[in-house]
Amino acid sequence: MEDKIVRFVDAAFATYDVTAVAETKADLVQHLLEKYHGLMEEGKSSDEAYKLTVESIGDVSELVDGEKPYQEPPVNLSASDLQNVDLSGTDIREGSFKGSSMRASDFQNANLPNAVFKGSELRDSNFAGANLVSATFSSSDMRGSDFTGANLTHASFDKSDMHDVVFDGANLINTTFKQADVSGVNFANQTLVGTSFEMTGLKGTSFKDAVLRNVSFHHSDARKAILDGATVDKITYASLKSSKADLSNVVVI
């Protein structure tokens, strides 16, 4: 059990610089081993003594004087051939996939905040349920990709091909589609806040029954966009009007 206690402490300090916390770790190990042996002398079984010992540690961050956990460098998979790769459920925050071929890849439920997919081929890839806050997909081939339930707050799809992309239930707050082509994409029943469609292709794009607040269509041609039953605020209404949208069936709030 002594080795097991040492391994437990090693794991508890795994995210800290080894040299910086060496003395603290050694002191803690000695303290825990003394506690463990004391419990054994009291008649506890080895399993009971181990459980009570490790439960007494608490939060190791309180033992480390100002030392910050070690941060692994961002993953760099730029300019890589990763077609059909399975990265579902992974944690790749700030990862770089610039210029990579990743067609039909699986990113379901992955944690990818601030990830960069600039100039990548992501056709038919699956991002359902992924955390993509502030991710960048600019100048990428996104055709047929699935973002069902994904968090795309502050994400960017500027200058990307978005044909047949699925956004059902996705969080699109402050997401930008500047100079992207979202023709035919379905945003029906979505709530869009601060979303930007500046200079964006909107032919056949559906906003049916959607709620749009502070959404920009600056310099876009919205004449073929579908807005039946959409609820828009006055700022969005003005932007749509300047883009020649058919506003006959929208509700202004």
Image (tube, helix red, strand yellow):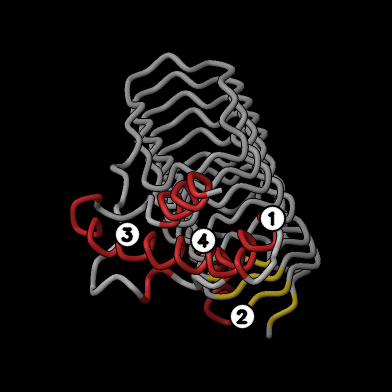
Residue located 42% across and 47% down the image: 93
Residue 185, percent from left and from top? 67, 43
Q: Amino acid at mark 1?
A: Asp
User: Counting residues from the N terminus, which is met first, the one under dot 3 or under dot 1?
Assistant: 3
Q: Amino acid at mark 4?
A: Thr
Q: Which residue bears the numbered disc 1?
A: 47
Q: Amino acid at mark 2?
A: Asp
User: Which callout, 4 or 3, points at the residue further toward the start of the chain?
Assistant: 3
Q: Could you tell me residue 161's position as x and y percent?
A: 51, 33
Q: Is 15 positioned to the left or the right of 186 in the image? A: left
How crowded pointer 4 is (Cα within 10 Å; few <14, some 14-19, many 20+) is rated as many
Pick the residue in front: 174 or 14. 14
Which is more toward the observer, 142 or 68?
68
Which residue corresponds to mark 2?
Answer: 233
Q: Residues within 10 Å of mark 2 (few under 14, many from 20)?
A: some
Q: Quadrant of the C terminus?
A: bottom right
Q: Which residue is mark 4?
A: 153
Q: Position of residue 213 (x, y in %)?
A: 59, 75
In contact (CB < 8 Å): disc 2 and disc 3? no
**Distance between mark 1 and mark 2 Cα atoms:** 63 Å
Q: Which SS class for mark 4?
A: loop
Identity of the residue drawn at 80% across and 67% down: 229
Q: Give me the residue at 56% from left, 60% from top.
A: 244
Q: Is residue 233 above or below residue 130?
A: below
Q: Which residue was labeled with disc 3?
A: 25
Q: Number of numbered discs present?
A: 4
Q: Secondary structure at mark 1?
A: helix
Numbered circle sitting on residue 3: none
Q: Nearer the viewer, mark 1 or mark 2?
A: 1
